Amino acid sequence: MRNLNSQLLRRSPIPRFAIEGGGGFLAGLLLAGTYVGAMTSPLPIAVAANLGSTGAASVLIGSILSYLISGTMLDNLPLLFALVVVTSLRMLKRPPKTAGGMAASTGLCVFLSGLAVSLLFHASGAAVIGYTMTAGLTGCASYFMHAVFSSIRTTGKIPLRSADGCAAAVVLILMVAALSCYSIPAMNAGCMVSTALTLLGARKYKCAGGVICGALTVCGAVLGAPEAGMPLLILPAGGLLAGYLAKRNRYAFTAAFFLFSVMGLITFGSSLFTVSTVCNLFLGSVAFLFLDAAQLEKWLDTDLPDRSDPLAPASARLRYMADALHTVREDTHAIASLLPQEEPAHDITREVCETVCGSCRSKLRCWESDYEKTLSGFRKMEMHTAATLPPIPEELSCCSRTDRLRALFSHQAAERRKTKFLAARTAESRTVLLEQLAAAEELLTAAGSHLYVRYSNELSETVHRRLLRYGYPCDCAAVYYTEADRMMIEICCEKHSLDGCIPTIRHILSEALNLTLEELDPLSSGDSMRYRLCQRPRYRLEQYISARHAQQESLSGDTAVSFTDSTGNPCLVLSDGMGTGKHAAVESRMTTELFRKFLTGGISGTAAVRMMNGILLTKSPEESFATLDVAQFDLDAGELTILKSGAAATLIRHAGKVSRISAQTFPLGLEPEGELAVRRVTLCPDDIILMLTDGVSEDAYPFIRQLLESTSDLEQIVKEVCEKAAIFAGGSQRDDVTVCAARLLPS
């Protein structure tokens, strides 16, 4: 199954090469020159071997800078030479695909580099043996790191109950050992990290997590700094005790762990109870308070590995159904294009002549002596397509059967009108059908992709138990992550049973998960209600809406709504019913309500517009059509998607400059094929989006542009535009005016 974390890396606003380059530089700067026991740490070479050319070059630059700062360039010359060789190989060829191949190539590079340096500087045999041992350690580190990197690249997570989990444990030991080389009086970085990770494991995975994380990190701390790491042998025991208190308050849990660890140090001997050890335990415990145990769910997978994906058959079936609909739609369109689009040609004059003139005694005189004149008269009557009887032309003024001629030509005109009407109706129905098939195809495709939404059974059960513990009735609770890797919580219960309780529930769950949760719009379905909470996104949205109805009306025909979609992102929807007053208000409110229901139900905007257009085409002739103007915000990526069907222009202030986005499209319910213009814009903090109805004249746009450039007060902008709309419309407000403004702000 493709995990959402790997999708997040691709969708990240920061380019992947920048992430790889920055991470590689930091790894080289921090890990170069560190030790694992008595040997130099091979982690910089292992990291460079498992990254691309950009990452490998960044590791090399960071390592050189680290050696220059520490003054150990000559001491680490063999490893630096090996790092140069590995980086060169990454630039010239792709890395090995298997962990064994990665280990062999990396170890060989280190061995040959050490041998070359030994020959160059006439090193002793002991040095050669040391380089050989370093090559073996580097190969092992590359092997395990390749397994970890491959797992993250393919699934976005590290499966703990598999060989990749063991590989991650080895990498963790090596990382803690490297960090343990950084120490100042009374503080050691590796020991503090060991304490924080032990607490994190105990909090998340209880006793087993505390013992395992404590043992692994202590092993790394002892390898990197034996004197500072030996007192931390108490960590596995402290993690075991903390695991029993994992459900307690976060601060009580941390305090109990710290006190037990200190008491254990005193019990085991005064030689272990030092100021440095106590400081490391304290600072590591404080660091844990700033970490989020729930976030481990994004990167670690504790489920048993299963090669057979239970969701794959369902997803494949939905995909096949979508492909079938796509094929049917294309075949239908192809067949329709091959069929004749016009009515078959009929010689109406000949048919009428045979009926009327066949038994007439003047036939020979009319059609032989005056053939051109008679034919011209018949053609003139044939050209008459109105519902009334055709007039008798001058060429047929002497005809004795004019009444019969008029009746037959009138009947033929009616048949032609009927045929054209049926052809137009068939074409319209065909277009509507194809649009509905396209909408159904999008629905099935979206449903298949939604099966890969990553649910957390453990967190769902935790939330459910916590709600029942505090006395809140709840049928079920679901915790999952969106494509942007943001946590969503849905609480299902009877309708209105938790009304007014959600702020308290939000506070309880925020404290339990150590996250800042936000409340979203509840969704109702039948007798049940879904209350939604979500993790705070990267950005937030400030909104303001104002409206004024036409002077002759007491009800505005415009409707503006704001809601959150199925992913927790806000949407602004503005609809303008044609005309003013009650009928326009009905159309605009029906349009916005339909769109809101579709989006909150998980349907995409384009599929919703197709379905809405088909619905609005079935309305009665007395009703009118309505425009649709949508602004969908992605608060994780800072992106805006604009959808327009017959709507007025949208003004955007981006980076201090005002631009205008418009689209020449028809309103919904006017054409069989719903026209929709889609535009995506990347926003920055403090950008403003202004949506208008056509009650605001285009003559007001220069004033609005100046207003947007001069202030960021949304209330002032919206009110001034509404107040000045009548002035720019010629002094009287004959149409409804609605203005929606939104500003993107950092959370």
Image (cartoon, rainbow, N blue to C red):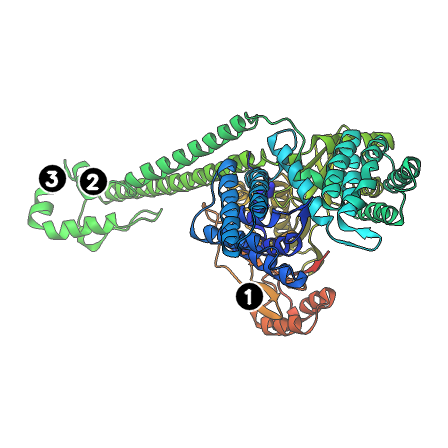
Amino acid type of disc 1?
Answer: Arg
Quarter residue 513 falls in: top right
At 36% across and 46% down in the image, what residue appears? Answer: 387
User: Which secondary structure lies at badge 3?
Assistant: loop
The answer to whether the residues at label 2 and label 1 have Cβ atoms under 8 Å apart is no
Identify the residue under disc 2. Answer: 352
User: Which secondary structure lies at badge 1?
Assistant: strand
Instruction: Tell which tag, 2 or 1, sits nearer the viewer.
Output: 1
Identify the residue under disc 3. Answer: 361
Q: What crowding class fits label 2: few (fewer than 14 Cα within 10 Å), some (14-19), or many (20 or more)?
A: some
Quarter residue 257 falls in: top right
Disc on res. 660: 1
Q: Note whether 74 is above or below 424 in the view shown.
A: below
The first of marks 2 and 3 along the sequence is: 2
The first of marks 3 and 1 along the sequence is: 3
State the CA–CA distance, disc 2 to disc 1: 61 Å
Number of marks in the image? 3
Amino acid type of disc 3?
Answer: Arg
Residue 446 at x, y = what percent? 54, 38
- Between 207 and 384, the one lying in front of the other is 207
State the CA–CA distance, disc 3 to disc 1: 75 Å
Instruction: Tell which tag, 3 or 1, sits nearer the viewer.
Output: 1
The first of marks 2 and 1 along the sequence is: 2
In the picture, measured across the screen, residue 189 lies left or right of residue 362, that is right
Amino acid type of disc 2?
Answer: Val
User: Which secondary structure lies at badge 2?
Assistant: helix
At 76% across and 28% down in the image, what residue appears? Answer: 475
